[in-house]
Image: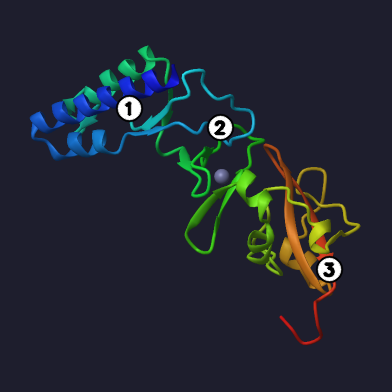
Amino acid sequence: MAKTILERANRVLQYANYLAKKTGNQSVMNRIEYVEIYTNGYAEPGYKDPESGVIVIGNWNPAGDRFGELISELPVFLRKAFERLDCDIQWDDQWSACYGCNKLVRIHPDCYTWKISAAVVNECEFYCHECIKDDPEQYVEEHLNNPKKCLTISVDLEALGFTRMDFDGEWHFGGHDKTPTEVAKGISGDFVFVQDSAHQFGMDYSVWVREPKEEGSQ
Ligand SMILES: [Zn+2]
């Protein structure tokens, strides 16, 4: 069944690309060209995969020129066509696909308590929290000894030799005003900061430490 819906969704998109080309307008063509169909579901916590198995991301606003004049409502009609097929519809500036599993993860907040469940590893590879948890070493390594970065994904730090520092890491609201850089000054050994939760006016974080592997090493 999912395959049939996928096939139909692909046909709808093909037809929309054809109609976009007929307008001869580059921005309409680009808009439809960037619409993407995904079938591996969500890796975002709290999201349930659609029964159709098909998620489509795009920019669904009507296409306009730089003066705000309407050029084409094709994106709006396309969205409606996908909705009729029971596809989940998302915005392309709010979601991104994992390099590893191709599941979709939110990259834009939708509430005060949201924190990102994905990360860029090796400079340009975007991975979801599920893939990072499978192989967290590189992710942790890239956040090591840097108080300006923090893990947002909870990985098994004990397995990597870290222990949680005894520290009340509530930032700002009901907590303290010490910056992570100031906190880091008092730490000997390797450390990583972990964002445990987010709130409207503050956040909770913890600091995890481990003995350096060998003396003099970085
Ligand atoms: Zn993944």
Please tell me whether mark 3 sits on a helix, a strand or a loop. Answer: strand
Q: Position of residue 127 (x, y in %)?
A: 55, 50
Q: Which mark is residue 210?
A: 3
Query: Dot 1 surroundings within 10 Å: few (below 14), some, or many (20 or more)?
Result: many
Residue shown at the point (45%, 31%) measured from the top left: 39
Q: In this picture, is 62 found above or below 24?
A: above
User: Would you identify the image quadrant in which residue 148 lies?
Assistant: bottom right
Q: In the depicted view, which residue is nearer to us: 135 or 146? A: 135
Provide the residue designation for mark 1.
60
Q: Residue furthest right?
A: 166
Relative to 10, 21 lies left or right = left
Contact flag, marks 3 and 2 (Cβ < 8 Å): no
Q: In the depicted view, which residue is nearer to us: 138 or 109? A: 138
Provide the residue designation for mark 2.
110
Query: Dot 3 surroundings within 10 Å: few (below 14), some, or many (20 or more)?
Result: some
Q: Amino acid at mark 3?
A: Arg
